Image (cartoon, helix red, strand yellow):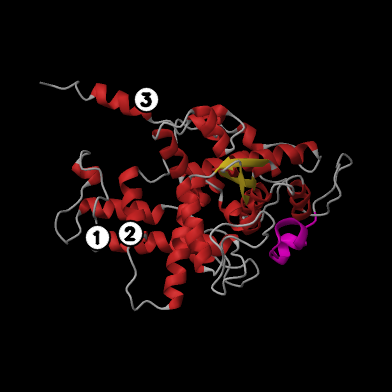
Amino acid sequence: MGEVALQREVPVSLEGRAAVLADGVRISAHSDVEAVAAWLEEYRDSVQTFRAYRKEAERLLLWLDSQGLTLGSLRRDGLDDFEAFLADPRPAAHWIGPPRPRHADDWRPFRRPLSAASRRQSLVILQGLYSWLVEAGWVDHNPFRLMRGKRRRLDNRQEGIERYLERPLWDWFWGWLNQPLAQTASPRERFEWQRRRMIFGFAYLLAPRIGEMAAARMGDFQRREGRWWWRVVGKGSKLATIPVPPDMMALLGDWREQLGLDRFPESDDDSPVLRGLDGKRGLGDNQLYRLIKKAFDTAAVRLEDGDSRDAGDQSASAEQHAVPSGDQPDVGNAVLARTLRAATPHWLRHTAITHQAQGGVELRYLARSARHSRLDTTARYLHAEAEEWQQQMSGHGLD
């Protein structure tokens, strides 16, 4: 939607539809696209936030164009239609598709219909967009502020994190990733095997965001007074230094040996950590996303085919965590496979932080590792109280 704004061309009708400028307009814009571009410029210093906000604004602009509307003509009753569209974009072939470069003809704004949590997040972001546009004089009102039950619908706080892999499923998945290769494996298969271990181990041990993984350099791993630290520039361009567990350095050493390098990096090594098949060029965010999703999907197939060793909690209910003793898949495997297929790269960050919390990492250190600015954000990953509540309630029955 224009190189500056959303970095994708939009329908001529939307790009050419200049808004009627009022005397109070305080930005240099001649169309809705340019107005949104000006808003996005406020987030240029935070790459991940910029991309997330661009995605939601882009969906809104494209939907408005399909309805013959503009930002300024959107009214309260249109928000219900828009939210329904987010839940079920139709026609699906027009709106939904696999990851593609943004300039590709078959690029689509959705990978799948949005869940309730994702819809809520979209509305939160777009409410912020409209608040800014009101201040800029581009629109005369914010329709999101008229939504009934606004606090319930637009408050992005949640009771707890639910999108993560529970420990038994993660343990099975990591074991599956580490199954030894056959002696006849090709050099490419060995490279991909080590890279996949590196990707998922990195994600689980240090809880990075996907953009942080793609941007990581070998020299970001630095040794000080006998201990290793990871230097990362994260959300909001904030610099942080995170302790690196020994397992991470072992994994990094294996990966570097695969690349023909010494096991430990030098601080001035600016080469990428995660690399393409040539062993030199770095992986982009989209490439990394596709590799992670492919691994989840492949693992789901293995579960359905009966490879379920320790994939579920044997003490949990059979309905939630059934693990068959034979080779045939059962209902429990199907549930676990659906979980893997639903998982996204960001689930790995949730999984890492949740498991750290369950492992006893104190909240203050957990918040620093996750690089949260608020402790209540980190506290959403604490599930111990819920487990204790369940145990105490289990004694409450009819007999």
> Which segment is the magenta one?
1-18
**From the viewer's perspective, is the residue at label 1 or at label 2 nearer?**
2
| Quadrant location of the N terminus in the rendered image | bottom right
N-term-proximal mark, 1 vs 3: 1
| Quadrant location of the C terminus in the rendered image | top left
Q: Is residue 101 above or below residue 31?
A: below
Q: Is residue 247 above or below residue 12?
A: above
- Kind of residue at disc 2: Trp
Gap in angstroms between the C-alphas marked 1 and 2: 9 Å
Residue 97 in sight here: no
Q: Which residue is mark 2?
A: 176
Q: Which residue is mark 3?
A: 385
**From the viewer's perspective, is the residue at label 3 or at label 2 nearer?**
2
Q: Is residue 2 above or below residue 51?
A: below
Of residues 84 and 67, the one drawn nearer to the viewer in this rendering: 84
Of residues 276 and 295, the one drawn nearer to the viewer in this rendering: 276
Residue in the picture at 44% in, 77% down: 187
SS of the residue under disc 2: helix
